[in-house]
Amino acid sequence: MLTVKRIHAGRSAVDYYLDQTRPGMADYYLPDERAGDDPALSAPGASWWGGGAEALELSGGVQRAEFVPLYAKAVRPGGGYLGRRFRLPEEADAAKADRLASAAEIADPHERWMAKHEIRRTGGHASVAAWDCTFSPPKSVSLLWAAGDRHVQAQVWAAHLTAVEAGLGYLQEHAAYVRAGAQGVRVLDTSGLVAASWLLVAGPWSASVR
């Protein structure tokens, strides 16, 4: 089963993961920044995946120094932006506030209301930094793993990883594209996905890959 969540640019793109390290979550995604100076992400199996990652020369374990700039501000390893610079939440809020202030000066009450309504409905938003995709097995698979011996568990885990690899491959083939031109009318191919992948086991009953 695939669950998808939109992650907006800015510090929240990183805090979404860092917040999971609150007491009791035990480094669910990334280690708490106060836990030490190790630049590597502590989640087991954290690694770069995808053709886009290869193009950026990202390989092996995911490092904080690479992950944070890339997902928060679209800054590629070595400097420079990955395509267009992300629009941060504070920038989007400031631009919307300016437009609302201008709309407040419209004399006609109905036109003023319509202008403000349109700004609130379609006003600029922060850039989408990433899509968080969680691949989780159905409950029946989790139960088979939990009830099985080590041999069965190894087979179930291997099958799960194979399914995830196939799912990521499908996404890379069919969803790794960009839009260009006015209103994004041109669809262009890319080198592939830039994915930071974590293998997670949430207790003895379930597993997922992000």
Image: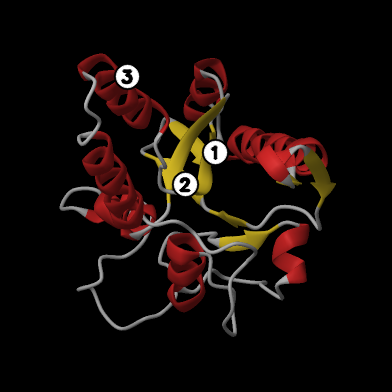
43 in relation to 158, above or below: below
Location of residue 109 in the rendering, given as x and y in whole percent from the top left corner: 20, 18
Residue type, label 2: Leu
The residue located at (62%, 67%) in the rendering is 82
Image-quadrant location for residue 113: top left
Q: Is residue 203 left or right of residue 181?
A: left
Location of residue 11 in the rendering, given as x and y in whole percent from the top left corner: 32, 60
Tell me the SS state at disc 2.
strand
Q: Nearer the viewer, residue 114 or 75?
A: 114
Near mark 3 (Cα within 10 A), the count class, few <14, some 14-19 or many ≥20, is: few
Task: Determine the CA span between mark 1 and mark 3.
Answer: 37 Å
Give the residue at mark 2.
200
Residue type, label 3: Met
Q: Nearer the viewer, mark 1 or mark 3?
A: 3
Considering the image in quadrants, where does the N terminus appear?
Answer: top right
Image-quadrant location for residue 190: bottom right
Q: Is residue 183 left or right of residue 94?
A: right
Task: Determine the CA span between mark 1 and mark 2.
Answer: 13 Å
Task: Determine the CA span between mark 3 and mark 2.
Answer: 48 Å
Pick whichever of labels 1 and 3 is earlier in the sequence. Answer: 3
Residue 186, visible in the rendered structure? yes
Pick whichever of labels 1 and 2 is earlier in the sequence. Answer: 1
Give the residue at mark 1.
133
Tell me the SS state at disc 1.
strand
Q: Nearer the viewer, residue 83 or 4?
A: 83
110 in relation to 22, above or below: above
Location of residue 33 in the rendering, given as x and y in whole percent from the top left corner: 25, 71
Give the residue at mark 3.
114
Residue 210, visible in the rendered structure? no
